[in-house]
Image (spheres, rainbow, N blue to C red):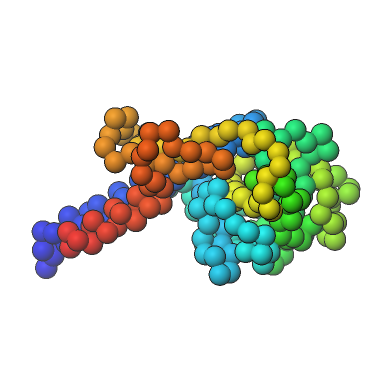
Amino acid sequence: MFTPSVAVALFFVPFALAQDNSLGVQAIEAHFTQSLLVPDLLSSFTPSSLLTVNFAGVGELQPGQALVKEQSAPYPTVKVTPGNSSVTLNGTYTLAMVDAEAPGSKLPEGQTRHWLVNGVKISGNDISNSSAVAVTDYAGPGPAAGSGVHRYVVVLYEQPANFSPPEALSKPGVPVQPFVFSDYVKNSNLGPLVAATYFTVQEGTATVSAVPTSSVISSTLKPAGSSTSKGASGTGSASAPGSSSSNGASTLTVPAAATLFGMLFALVM
């Protein structure tokens, strides 16, 4: 027989998980805007799911997490989680990683392609490349010394039946090189975008002026269907590259808040 405290905890677990996904989607949207990946790389960003990247020895990355190039050199594992119960992930997808360089960068030759895999499948939450075409196999970051904080974006797109990549990017073995990512997405008929995340790598001390970015304030995010949380206590922030908090608030990322929810429920039990 359940005690009242156990019954309350069990009742709230599904609700808390639903909140986590809702807040997580809102948080990654905010990260892409406030780190200037929108519009530097994407004209808009409305993901339906959450993408997580894990490097051996580092663990699951938070959006915008700073790494050194040695940490991001191994082949990563990538997982995707639906943003809500109405999202299904049972199709065919394209997975890519590109270097959008420092915030505000103008890249006439496009972004450097570090990874491009067509025909990936999703098993559970895992992205499987076993039957896919690795056009450009994973190559870790190698930003030029002094070039500032580079943003490495990992993105997952739906690959529809009319997917038609250019001949030069349809077979395996293509080396790391610049390409205009938005043109590839458009001309190949990719879409819609499912999920994305990013991490940063910097080599040496920057010798270029950094374009300012802003922080993601977790207290401004709210689960679907809830009232606005502006003015709530416990304001927290997750910083984008080069950003700083102007109000001295303590740092509390959305994943950390989710963990705190879990701890509180455990205490109730």
Asked whether residue 10 is in view, the answer is no
Q: Residue at x 85, y 44 (%)?
A: 166
Residue 103: tell me if it is visible: yes
- Residue 112's x, y, as percent? 77, 47
Q: Position of residue 153 (x, y in %)?
A: 64, 47
Image-based side of 213 in relation to 139, left or right: left
Q: In the image, is residue 147 above or below residue 186? A: below
Instruction: Please provide percent x and percent y for residue 37.
Output: 62, 37
Direction from residue 63 to residue 101 in the image, left or right: right
Quadrant location of the C terminus?
Answer: bottom left
Q: Looking at the image, is 39 positioned above or below residue 2?
A: above
* Picture quadrant where residue 52 is located: bottom right
Please give the name of the residue rendered at 66% of the width and 64% of the height, measured from the top-left corner: 70
Residue drawn at x 13%, y 59% as measured from the top left: 5
User: Closest to the observer: 91 or 259?
Assistant: 259
The residue closer to the viewer here, 93 or 260, is: 260
Task: Identify the image quadrant of residue 190.
Answer: top right
Q: Residue 107 appears at what percent x and percent y?
A: 78, 36
Name the foreground residue: 186 vs 107. Answer: 107
Which of the 4 quarters of the picture holds residue 1? bottom left
Foreground residue, 86 or 155? 155
